[in-house]
Image: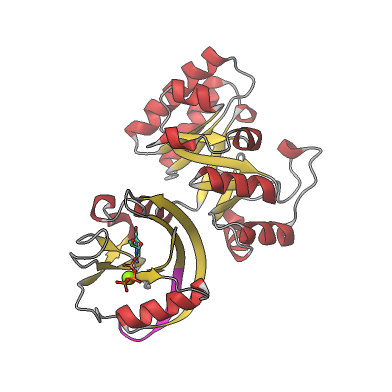
Amino acid sequence: MLKVAVGVIKNQYNEVLISKRSKKAHQGGLWEFPGGKVEEGEKTEDALKRELLEELNIEVLTAVPFIQVKHDYNDIGVLLEVYLVESFQGKACGMEGQPIKWLAIDSLEKSSFPAANKAIIDALNLPRYYPIVDESIGAEEEMLRHLKTLISGGYTMIQWRAKSLNKSGFKHLAEQAMALCKRNNVRLFINSSMTDALEMNAEAIHLSANEVLAMKNKASSLEGVLLAASCHNEQELKAAKELGVLFAVLSPVCATQTHIGMKPLGWPQFKSLSEAVPLPVFALGGVGPETLDKALSNGAYGVAGIRAFGR
Ligand SMILES: Nc1nc2c([nH]c(=O)n2[C@H]2C[C@H](O)[C@@H](COP(=O)(O)OP(=O)(O)OP(=O)(O)O)O2)c(=O)[nH]1
Ligand SMILES: [Mg+2]
């Protein structure tokens, strides 16, 4: 497997730099995030610095690990180690004659990039908030009403769960929620078993940690379905990463009503766990929109919660 250092270079307008691969290269003629092969014995971060200097004539000042993407092209397999380049020196230009351009993150077209980049683009477009609707909000009508409130509040990614309903009751309710979200261009993650969620044609599924551990290496049949997972420790985070989830939720950070009996992680442990696995991680448990900054400074990608959102 070819190890590749890839830099998503951001500017202050929330744009990223993309560069066109030469026609003759592997995956030629498509756009890419600049970078290149890690040499024998080289650290990925050093390869990133070297490649961006060679290809763009810029000096990387700060780069943080973002995600890793494994992809099998028919001819070769690649492991893309993707960094967010948050600051650099110099003016970027195409040193190998390649066209380059700055583009807003939400206008990156997946079809103009190699297939492995789909996961990078999905991750770049992840919102920072992940509200959860469950039965602690109220009965079925109240859950749907709360979902509408969240949608009007501008939230674009929401989790839906109702653990006490039987399978057909949950399916009926989830279908109404999915239809509402579809009309409003909101991504709804259905929290249930993989089998049930697939049966109701969910486009996004939120898995429990146990389900993730039980699913090892079974993700290949899931093309086109987005996955997320609930995790509480490093082993679960690693299994979720291995399964190919888009992001994980790590809990409980602080003590809450919904996590009675579970020992809170606290921020220092949250930070070391989220840094141990290259995956966007949302903090859950006593956090909300007003704690986003605190969460970000502790390695979180964003915050998740039930009652803290849409009130
Ligand atoms: N740099 C980069 N490579 C990508 C991306 N997506 C993707 O699938 N790849 C694949 C294509 C290649 O098989 C491999 C990276 O190779 P590369 O052509 O950039 O490597 P390099 O700069 O060292 O090239 P060279 O000196 O060997 O010509 O990873 C991406 O966004 N950026
Ligand atoms: Mg390159």
Residue 252 counted in the magenta span:
no
Q: Position of residue 108 (x, y in %)?
A: 29, 56
Is most of the magenta stretch helix, strand or loop?
Answer: strand
Q: Residue drawn at (71%, 46%), measured in percent from left and top?
A: 252
Give the magenta part as a residue range: 84-91
The total of numbered circles placed on residues is 0
Q: Position of residue 42 (x, y in %)?
A: 51, 76
Q: Residue drawn at (44%, 71%), measured in percent from left and top?
A: 38
Q: Residue drawn at (24%, 78%), measured in percent from left and top?
A: 94
Q: Image quadrant for the C terminus?
A: top right
Question: Within the displayed image, which quadrant is ligand 1 positioned in?
Answer: bottom left
* Vertical comparison of 293 with 183: above or below: below
* Vertical comparison of 227 with 60: above or below: above
- Report whether 267 appears left or right of 186: right
- Of residues 151 and 87, the one drawn nearer to the viewer in this rendering: 87
Is residue 149 in sight in this rendering? no
- Report whether 18 appears left or right of 208: left
Q: Position of residue 95 (x, y in %)?
A: 25, 82
Q: Position of residue 93 (x, y in %)?
A: 26, 81
Is residue 68 in sight in this rendering? yes
- Of residues 154 and 132, the one drawn nearer to the viewer in this rendering: 132
- Report whether 199 appears left or right of 271: left
Q: Image quadrant for the N terminus?
A: bottom left
* Vertical comparison of 26 with 59: above or below: above
- Report whether 31 appears left or right of 121: left
Q: Residue drawn at (24%, 70%), measured in percent from left and top?
A: 101
